[in-house]
Image: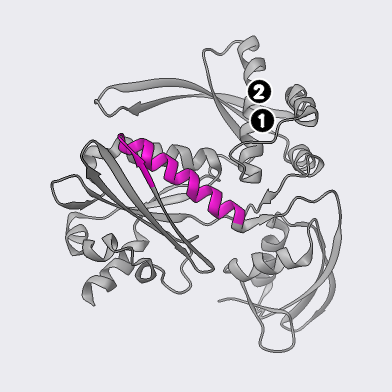
C-alpha cells in the first residue's frame, strides 16, 4: 500500500509535452531555408499539419476541395517564425533541422474544417501521462536516461498530432519507491486519482526480445480504456507507432462528428457563485470552450446565473465537455450545473 500511495503522489511531478503550447492553429514543417519561395512552398504542408491537429486525423482525405484550400494557405496566414531543433540519435549523434512555424487565422481554419465536413477534435485536451518501463536485459527500469532520444521522439510525435502528454519526473528516491511490478502488469487504475487533471494514463511495458522490441500498451481514462501492442527492431519506432495509436484513440473518443455549418441555441443555469470573481471565472470558461460561439446573460439571481449560449455543435457534445472539464459539476437540484470548488 505505501508504494501505491507513492505512485499516486508521483503524479504531481510531471514533465509535459503540451500540444496546445504552440497553439492548435500553428503548423510546423521542416524547411531548407528562410527564403520567400521556400516558405511559400511549405505553407500548404503547414496548413495540413494544423488540420491534422484540429481533426485528429493522421491522414486527410484527398480531393479537389482540399487542394483548393491548400492553394490559398498564404491568404489565411497570420504570422510565422523559424525554429532550429536538435535531436539526439540512437548512435549519439545530433540531428539538426530548421522548422517553419506558421500560425493561421483560427476562424478561417474552423470554416475549412466544417466546409470539408471533417470531424472536430475538441480543443479542451488534458495531458495523458505516460509511464514507460523498459526491460532490455538489465532489469526493469522506469524511463532509463540512455533512451532519452526515444522519449523525445514520443513527445515530438504527440505534439505533431495535437495530443498533450506528460512523463513522470521523479527523484531517484521516488523511482526506487515505485512498484515496477505493478506498472509492468498494467495496473493503470492505481494511477488515476479521482478528480485528477488528466486525460488518462498509459503504461508501456517495453521488452527486448532478440533483435526486436515488443511493447505492450495499456491505456485507461475515466471514460475509456484500451490495449494494443507495437513491434520494431528500433525502440523509438515502436514507441512512435504506439503514440500514433494513442492519438487515434483519444481523438476518436473526444471528437465531434463531421457536421456542416449550424448553430444550436441553449440555456444553461449555473449556481454556486460567491462573488464577481466566480462570475468572471465561469464566463471566461464558457467563452473559451471551442463548442461555444456566443454567451449572454438571460437572467440572474443571488448565487445563480442563467446563460444563453450559441453552440456550433449539438448540445450533447457540450454536456460531455462540461462533465469532463473540472470546472462545473451536475447540480443535484434546481440549476443545471454548480461551480466546482
Query: Do the CB atoms of the residues marked 2 and 1 lie less than 8 Å apart?
Result: yes
Is 309 covered by the magenta stretch?
Answer: no
Q: Is residue 306 visible?
A: yes
- SS class, disc 2: helix
Q: Which of the pair 131/2 is nearer the observer?
A: 131
Residue 222: image x %, image y %? Answer: 50, 69
Where does label 1 land, which residue?
A: 47
Q: Which of the pair 224/102 is nearer the observer?
A: 224
- Quick check: 94 left or right of 302? left
Is 233 covered by the magenta stretch?
Answer: yes
- Quick check: 322 left or right of 209? right
Q: Counting other residues with Cα less than 10 Å from the Cα at mark 2, is it few (<14), some (14-19), or many (20 or more)?
A: many
Where does label 2 land, which residue?
A: 43
Identify the residue at horizontal 66%, vertical 88% (top origin).
332
Residue 210: image x %, image y %? Answer: 20, 39
Q: Quadrant of residue 275?
A: bottom right
Q: Is residue 281 visible?
A: no
Q: Which residues are magenta?
A: 230-252
Q: Residue furthest front?
A: 210
Q: Quadrant of residue 234?
A: top left
Residue 135: image x %, image y %? Answer: 21, 49
Identify the residue at horizontal 39%, vertical 20% (top origin).
96
Identify the residue at horizontal 29%, vertical 66% (top origin).
7
Amino acid at each position: 500500500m505505501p508504494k501505491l500511495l507513492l505512485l499516486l503522489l508521483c503524479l504531481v511531478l510531471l514533465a509535459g509535452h503540451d500540444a496546445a503550447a504552440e497553439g492548435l492553429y500553428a503548423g510546423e514543417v521542416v524547411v531548407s531555408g528562410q527564403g520567400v519561395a521556400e516558405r511559400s512552398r511549405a505553407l500548404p504542408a503547414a496548413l495540413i499539419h494544423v488540420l491534422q491537429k484540429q481533426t485528429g486525423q493522421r491522414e486527410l482525405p484527398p480531393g479537389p476541395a482540399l487542394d483548393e484550400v491548400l492553394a490559398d494557405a498564404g491568404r489565411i496566414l497570420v504570422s510565422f517564425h523559424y525554429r532550429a531543433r536538435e535531436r539526439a540519435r540512437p548512435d549519439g549523434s545530433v540531428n539538426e533541422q530548421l522548422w517553419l512555424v506558421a500560425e493561421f487565422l483560427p476562424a478561417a481554419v474552423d470554416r475549412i474544417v466544417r466546409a470539408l465536413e471533417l470531424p472536430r477534435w475538441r480543443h479542451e485536451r488534458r495531458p495523458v501521462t505516460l509511464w514507460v518501463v523498459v526491460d532490455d536485459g538489465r532489469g526493469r527500469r522506469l524511463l532509463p536516461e540512455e533512451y532519452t532520444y526515444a522519449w523525445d521522439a514520443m513527445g515530438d510525435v504527440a505534439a505533431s498530432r495535437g495530443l498533450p502528454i506528460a512523463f513522470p519526473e521523479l527523484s531517484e528516491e521516488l523511482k526506487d519507491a515505485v512498484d515496477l511490478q505493478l506498472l509492468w502488469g498494467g495496473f493503470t487504475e492505481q494511477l488515476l486519482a479521482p478528480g485528477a487533471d488528466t486525460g488518462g494514463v498509459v503504461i508501456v511495458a517495453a521488452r527486448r526480445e532478440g533483435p526486436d522490441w515488443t511493447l505492450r500498451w495499456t491505456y485507461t481514462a475515466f471514460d475509456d480504456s484500451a490495449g494494443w501492442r507495437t513491434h520494431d527492431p528500433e525502440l523509438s519506432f515502436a514507441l512512435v507507432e504506439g503514440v500514433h495509436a494513442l492519438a487515434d484513440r483519444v481523438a476518436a473518443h473526444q471528437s465531434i462528428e463531421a457536421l456542416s455549418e449550424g448553430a444550436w441555441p441553449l440555456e444553461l443555469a449555473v449556481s454556486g457563485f460567491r462573488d464577481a470573481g466566480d462570475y468572471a471565472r465561469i464566463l471566461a470558461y464558457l467563452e473559451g470552450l471551442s463548442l461555444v460561439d456566443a454567451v449572454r446573460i438571460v437572467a440572474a439571481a443571488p448565487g445563480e446565473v442563467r446563460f444563453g449560449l450559441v453552440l456550433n455543435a449539438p448540445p450533447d457534445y457540450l454536456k460531455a465537455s462540461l462533465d469532463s472539464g473540472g470546472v462545473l459539476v451536475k447540480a443535484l437540484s434546481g440549476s443545471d450545473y454548480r461551480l466546482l470548488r
